[in-house]
Amino acid sequence: MKVADLMRQPAVTVCASASLVATARLMRERDVGFVAVIESGALVGVVTDRDIVLRSVSVNGRANDILVSDVMSRHVLTCLECQTVENAAARMGDNQVRRLPVLDETGNLVGVLSLDTIAEDYSESLAGETLGEIVEERSPPPNVAP
């Protein structure tokens, strides 16, 4: 099965200059734990419910003044809609993430693939194996001298 057959679409998006409070409200209204951050049509980051909880407390200032750009993850792992679900799940496990923004062949955001969706609509077994890799405690890579 291809990612395009399983992904949730459209992805919930915000811009980097959106207020974090408004973004949290949007997430509650849409019942999602993940939003993609888009600037000039390009994917520039993601914000999860976990980011909001953990990162916003470290930002100085009032909650209403915190922007998405202050807490978003800028290193975004993605998958392509033409990839297999197994390939995307392997990417999730390898990188210990539960959701992947899905891009089309031209690099446009077209949806989101989540571990929950894999479990509910495709394979509990694959989702369970992937979750095992996601939660696996790993040691950081050793420092290598130049």
Image (cartoon, grey):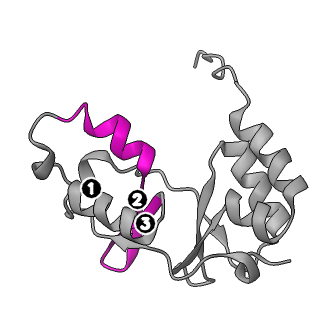
- Which numbered circle lies on residue 68? 1
Please tell me whether residue 144 is drawn above or below residue 16 in the rendered image.
Answer: above
Which badge, 2 or 3, is on the more N-terminal residue?
3
Estimate the x, y position of residue 43 in percent, counting from the top left: 42, 69
Q: Indicate the position of residue 2 as horizontal and vertical percent values.
A: 80, 78
Q: Which residue is mark 2?
A: 45
User: Of the residues under marks 1 and 2, which one precedes in the sequence?
Assistant: 2
- Residue 38 is inside the magenta segment: yes
Most extreme residue toward the right is 125
At 71% from the left and 81% from the top, the residue drawn is: 4
Contact? badges 2 and 3 (CB < 8 Å): yes
Kindly check if marks 1 and 2 are in contact, taking CB atoms under 8 A apart as contact.
yes
Q: SS at mark 1?
A: helix
Q: Residues within 10 Å of mark 1 (few under 14, many from 20)?
A: many
Identify the residue at horizontal 74%, vertical 30% (top origin).
136
Q: Residue at x 27, y 39 (%)?
A: 56
Counting residues from the N terminus, which is met first, the one under dot 3 or under dot 1?
Answer: 3
> Which amino acid type is shown beneath numbered disc 1?
Val
Q: Which residues are magenta?
A: 34-59
Residue bearing the label numbered 3:
36
Q: Helix, strand or loop at disc 3?
A: strand
